[in-house]
Image (cartoon, helix red, strand yellow):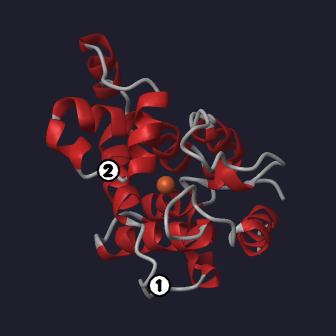
Amino acid sequence: MHSIVSKIVDAFEQRGSGKYGEECVTQLQHALQSGQFAIRAQADTTLITAALLHDIGHIIGDDDMPVHCDENLDDHHESKGYEFLIEHFGRPVAEPVRLHVVAKRYLCTTNPAYENQLSPTSLKSFHDQGGTMSTEEIQQFENEDFYQDALRLRHWDDAAKDPEAKTPSITDFIPYLQASLIENSCE
Ligand SMILES: [Fe+2]
């Protein structure tokens, strides 16, 4: 197994049991459910990997995810995730991860009904992360190469909060991770 893949599996095994903010699922359950939605949607392997790893920025490094809604929930985890992933997985994985936060702002701006179905935590982070987009920001987002993938990922992210869901295990995702590595990715 590639060293980055074992590092990811270790991170989930060691830190994945932490709560996903104030939601009723753990970090690991949330990641596995997102990845499972991508599999069910027959997404490309790289997008399945992105869905699984979209919040990896919360569990790598030493900082804990902000948990309480009275904190500022904008912790830039999407940028940490991007930095962690780009070298080994390239843009098809790292870009939807980078864009998944701004994708929520886009969905809430272009479809106000989307905001009504967000969980209280997700609604709070939406405002902390900048809230409604300007026309320029919408244009800028639609100019991103991977914005459609980021929107698909965002829908899975927002649905992946079911404490009762049955999912594959993290090790079941290893083949997707391995197959998403860029060629000649250094160990
Ligand atoms: Fe998420």
Figure quadrant of the N terminus: bottom right
Count of marks overlaid on the render: 2
Residue 72 makes an appearance in the image: yes
Q: Is mark 2 within 8 Å of ligand 1?
A: no
Q: Position of residue 82 (x, y in %)?
A: 62, 41
Q: Which residue is mark 2?
A: 118
170 in relation to 26, above or below: below
Q: Nearer the viewer, residue 43 or 9?
A: 9
Query: Disc 1 residue type?
Result: Thr
Q: Position of residue 17 (x, y in %)?
A: 69, 72
Numbered disc 1: secondary structure: loop
Q: Determine the residue positioned at 62% across, 50% down.
A: 67
Q: Which residue is mark 1?
A: 167
Q: Determine the residue positioned at 41% across, 83% down.
A: 165
Q: Position of residue 66 (x, y in %)?
A: 65, 45
Q: Name the side, left or right, on which 177 lies relative to 158.
A: right
Question: In terms of sequence position, does the residue under pointer 2 or pointer 1 come before the other?
Answer: 2
